[in-house]
Amino acid sequence: MADAPFNHFNSTAYDLGRGVFDLAAHTIMAMLTNVAPDPNAHYYSDLRSTELAPGNGYVAGGLIVPSTGLVNSADVASFNVGAVIWTSAVGAMGPFRYVVYYDLTAPNKNLLGWFDNGASLTLNGLNSDVFDFAIDGAVLFTLAISP
């Protein structure tokens, strides 16, 4: 479970404002890294070199985030996401500490933000270890317009 706050990249609000993200229709991905993301990074390509190496259950680029949706209630829009589950196979998968979200459909695969797991984790693969990353309340972030 994600108890830590969602950290946005410095470009996230700018990209939302100029319509880069279509949160109701685009494919959102989650990738793993053991290197703290640079808040000034803008695109998936900026972090690709720090991404967890593919193999033993991890696929380059990460996994599609299921059940995404944009919900509006009382002038507050919430971007909801489902759990992302990685299962190690055969050998070790990791270490990793950060789960980074990005928009696969955006022309430059723009970054949305990340969570810090709090400590590095390695799945051993011997017992089909699972990293089930679910966000408390399933809300990645909310947008509200202030009067």
Image: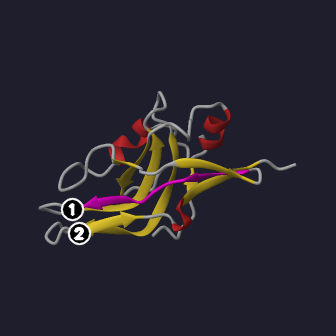
Q: Amino acid at mark 2?
A: Asp
Residue 84, position in %: x, y? 38, 57
Residue 49, position in %: x, y? 33, 43
Q: Which mark is residue 24?
A: none
Does residue 47 appear to the left or right of 127 in the view shown?
A: right
Residue 23, position in %: x, y? 56, 41
Does residue 90 appear to the left or right of 78 in the view shown?
A: left
Q: Is residue 141 above or below residue 42?
A: below
Task: Give the quadrant of residue 142.
Answer: bottom right
Q: Nearer the viewer, residue 4 or 24?
A: 24
Could you tell me which residue is drawn at 18 percent across and 63 percent down? 92
Dot 1 lies on which element? Answer: loop
Give the overall secondary structure of the magenta segment.
Answer: strand
Q: Which residue position holds label 1? A: 88
Q: Amino acid at mark 1?
A: Ser
Dot 2 lies on which element? Answer: loop
Could you tell me which residue is drawn at 61 percent across and 36 percent down? 15
Task: Give the quadrant of residue 123.
Answer: bottom left
Residue lying farthest to the top in this orientation: 107
The magenta stretch spans which residues? 76-88
The question of residue 56 being in magenta is answered with no
The question of residue 86 being in magenta is answered with yes
Residue lying farthest to the right in this orientation: 147
Q: Which residue position holds label 2? A: 129
Could you tell me which residue is drawn at 60 percent across and 40 percent down? 11
Are circles 1 and 2 on residues that touch, CB within 8 Å?
Answer: yes
Could you tell me which residue is drawn at 18 percent across and 67 percent down? 128
Does residue 4 appear to the left or right of 146 in the view shown?
A: left
Image quadrant where one finds the N terminus: bottom left
Give the class, few, some or many, for how many residues have Cα within 10 Å of label 2's Cα (few <14, many ≥20).
Answer: some
Q: Nearer the viewer, residue 84 or 59?
A: 84
